[in-house]
Image (cartoon, helix red, strand yellow):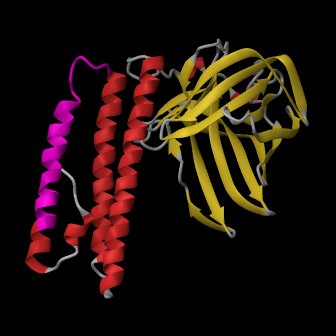
């Protein structure tokens, strides 16, 4: 069913009847759509993509009708009609995004496989974050050694990543708190606490983040925040213990909120940045966000250092470079 935004510019009984009919269709559409995506021939990964696509469509419709409700309170006729038209354009663009995200999820299923994403988390299989770098060897490409600090130039800004030595328990696992602070033009624009844990095999897991975004010194939102165990979110792999070319893995899984994933492209890559270099010893990954299908990034990780460089896969343009670091206190 296509909801035409021009048809709601009238008033009185006709408009109310139209809106009521449209809203009554939503649960019927939900039942029909859910039935359509429950085909047993599809695996759990594809079914997840299809049901999430249905949810996306209904969210778009909800946003559209809420905007129309706001438009109805515009006293100026021209302003009200303009508001309705903008609402329709925004709705159509959002629908296109829903289709793009579904395609990205489907493509990921082709590479990742159809299995359910339900990692087994046993707290006994994770190491004490305070022992990393001492009794416990760190993952060489993602060293969570307390006190470590990396400084990056990121476009017009600077990002400082710091393994604070603080911890937080999530799903029974003691996670290291890694603080990521981004400053642009002398002002803090992002302050994020990421929660990582290393298992006994050396894999580094990502258990969530609390992301604070600022404008003019004021907190504007915490968009992107998620925690494993809340609203069925699940941890992902930040970096493998033994990466192999062709590996695909989820870095985070908070459906509809945080769906980063990665593929290992090379384990013998080379790169040079102001603070470090690797000659045939870097791990190169392609990172992508399933919720933003056009956002592809190539990342280089140097042994003994960690993440050193981010580039655009199409142009090779450098977007993030490591300019200083220290491992441990």
The residue drawn where x is 59% and y is 14% is 246
Instruction: Identify the residue shown where x is 31% and y is 61%.
Output: 64
Q: Is residue 218 left or right of residue 148?
A: left
Q: Is residue 39 magenta?
A: yes
Residue 325 highlighted magenta (yes or no): no
Task: Relative to 104, say whether 127 is above or below.
Answer: above
Residue 200 relative to residue 250: left or right: right
**Is residue 139 something that shows in the picture?**
no
Where residue 198 appears, as percent x and y from the top left, is 65, 24
Q: Is residue 77 visible?
A: yes
Q: Position of residue 282 (x, y in %)?
A: 78, 20
Residue 53, quarter of picture: top left
In the rendered structure, which segment of residues is drawn in magenta?
18-43
- Indicate whether 157 appears above or below 270: below
The image quadrant where one finds the C terminus is top right
Q: Nearer the viewer, residue 320 or 118?
A: 320
Instruction: Point out residue 239 in the picture as x, y percentages from the top left corner.
Output: 65, 24
Q: Main secondary structure of the magenta part?
A: helix
């Amino acid at each position: 069913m296509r909801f035409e935004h021009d048809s709601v510019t009238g008033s009185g009984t006709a408009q109310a009847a139209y809106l009521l009919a449209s809203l009554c269709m939503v649960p019927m559409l939900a039942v029909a759509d859910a039935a359509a995506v429950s085909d047993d021939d599809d695996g759990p990964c594809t079914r997840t993509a299809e049901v999430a696509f249905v949810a996306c469509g209904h969210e778009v419709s909800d946003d559209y009708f809420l905007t129309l409700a706001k438009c109805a309170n515009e006293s100026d006729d021209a302003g009200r009609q303009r508001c309705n038209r903008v609402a329709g354009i925004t709705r159509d663009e959002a629908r296109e995004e829903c289709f793009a995200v579904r395609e990205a999820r489907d493509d990921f299923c082709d590479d990742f496989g159809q299995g359910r994403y339900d990692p087994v988390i046993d707290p006994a299989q994770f190491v004490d974050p305070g022992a990393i770098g001492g009794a416990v060897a760190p993952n060489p490409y993602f060293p969570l050694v307390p006190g470590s600090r990396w400084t990056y130039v990121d476009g017009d800004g600077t990002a400082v990543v710091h393994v604070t030595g603080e911890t937080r328990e999530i799903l029974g696992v003691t996670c290291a708190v890694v603080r990521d602070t981004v400053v642009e033009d002398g002002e803090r624009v992002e302050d994020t606490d990421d929660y990582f844990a290393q298992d006994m095999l050396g894999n580094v897991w990502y258990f969530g983040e609390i992301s604070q975004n600022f404008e003019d010194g004021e907190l504007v939102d915490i968009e992107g925040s998620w925690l494993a165990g809340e609203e069925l979110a699940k941890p992902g792999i930040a970096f493998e213990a033994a990466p192999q070319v062709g590996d695909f893995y989820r870095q985070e899984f908070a459906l509809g909120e945080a769906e980063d994933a990665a593929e290992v492209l090379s384990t013998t890559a080379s790169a040079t940045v102001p603070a470090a270099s690797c000659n045939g010893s870097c791990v190169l990954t392609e990172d992508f966000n399933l919720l933003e299908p056009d956002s592809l990034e190539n990342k280089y990780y140097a042994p003994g250092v960690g993440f050193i460089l981010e580039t655009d896969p199409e142009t090779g343009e450098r977007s993030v470079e490591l300019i200083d670091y220290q491992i441990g206190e």
